Amino acid sequence: MSHLSLCAKGISYSYPSGTEPLAGATIDIPPASRVAILGANGSGKTTLLKILAGSLEPTSGTVEVDGVPLRHTRRGLRRHRQDVQLVLQDPDDQLFSADVAHDVAFGPANLGLNRSEISERVAEALDLLSIEPLADRPTHELSYGERKRVTIAGAMAMRPCVLLLDEPSAGLDPAGVEEMFQALDKLEKNHTTVVLSTHDTALAYEWADSVAVVHGGAVRQGPPDEILRDGNVMTAARLRPPWLIELWDRLHAREVELPRSVPRNTDECAQHIAELLQSRNTAWQLQFTPEGAGPVSSPVDPVLAHRFSSHSG
């Protein structure tokens, strides 16, 4: 699987109703990267993904793969869809066969591959998504999360260089989201570029190399700690910053001595705060009187106490 760059330059698109979700939008997706597309409902996230996949032809602008413009001809689209695969939000929109193995085999079979190569690709895709035990299961018996992973396996059986996911965490409980992103981590090891749309800024902040906020027909793209910390961008797009950024900025506003760079996940946050507490000698400790009267907590910054109490459990 070769690495490919994918980009959309100056993309505009109008629906027959007259709605124009994109007007001169540009997005750049480097090889082997993780890109999160963020935006409010109706902002154009799904439209942008469909244009990148070749499912929609833009009113103006170009989609390029390694600098070569996509041609919306049968031959051009056939080639493009071997390199770039789109998985829709609702898995039932893409499940066609009676059982999992046959559904995952659908795409490779349409490429005209022989039976041996189809079987090899199916086994490879099921392994990537850790769903080998589901191979013979009827698709209608699967849970929602399992169906989502099967649709991703079907896309991966095409051995794409770029995988586009529309709201992959939508409708999943926390355990399902964790399983989904464990599967996506395996795709990264397979050198697959992953682009996903989401409303979850905290998820995007922790996971992505680059974020692209869609608003007003345009795209603002950059590093997560730059874009998601830009109050003007977030307010205009009707998005709330990740809680880690909110916490860090509030602590800095209270002159708490912390690094300017915001931690990317809970573990990094806990490490920074533990170091701060140790340096101040105010770590939470149990102190006992000589008579054993019981524990007394050390003084704790009230901002930290409120934040941790609100996230407990």
Image (cartoon, rainbow, N blue to C red):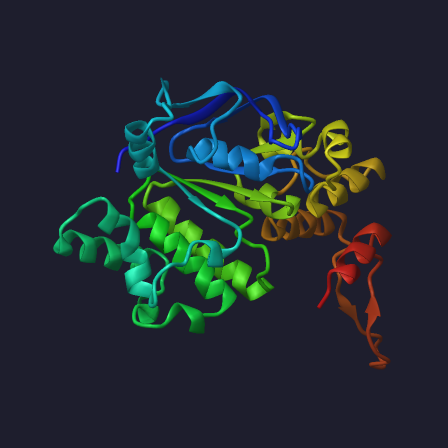
- Please tell me whether residue 62 is drawn above or below residue 203 in the rendered image: above
Please state the total of marks drawn on the protein image.
0
Q: Residue at x 38, y 31 (%)?
A: 31
Q: Residue 56 versus residue 144: which sits nearer the camera?
A: 56
Q: Is residue 8 left or right of residue 277?
A: left
Q: Residue at x 78, y 60 (%)?
A: 310
Residue 227 picture quarter: top right
The image shows residue 204 at horizontal and vertical percentages of 59, 43
Q: Residue 23 versus residue 269: which sits nearer the camera?
A: 23
Residue 312 picture quarter: bottom right
Q: Residue at x 69, y 44 (%)?
A: 242
Q: Residue at x 43, y 51 (%)?
A: 184
Residue 75 picture quarter: top left
Q: Quadrant of the N terminus?
A: top left
The image shows residue 133 at horizontal and vertical percentages of 32, 71
Point out the residue furthest to the front here.
16
The image shows residue 74 at horizontal and vertical percentages of 31, 31
Camera sees residue 240: yes
Q: Is residue 48 left or right of residue 2?
A: right
- Please tell me whether residue 102 is drawn above or below residue 81 in the rendered image: below
Camera sees residue 264: no
Q: Residue 30 versus residue 58: which sits nearer the camera?
A: 58
Q: Quadrant of the C terminus?
A: bottom right
The image shows residue 215 at horizontal and vertical percentages of 68, 30
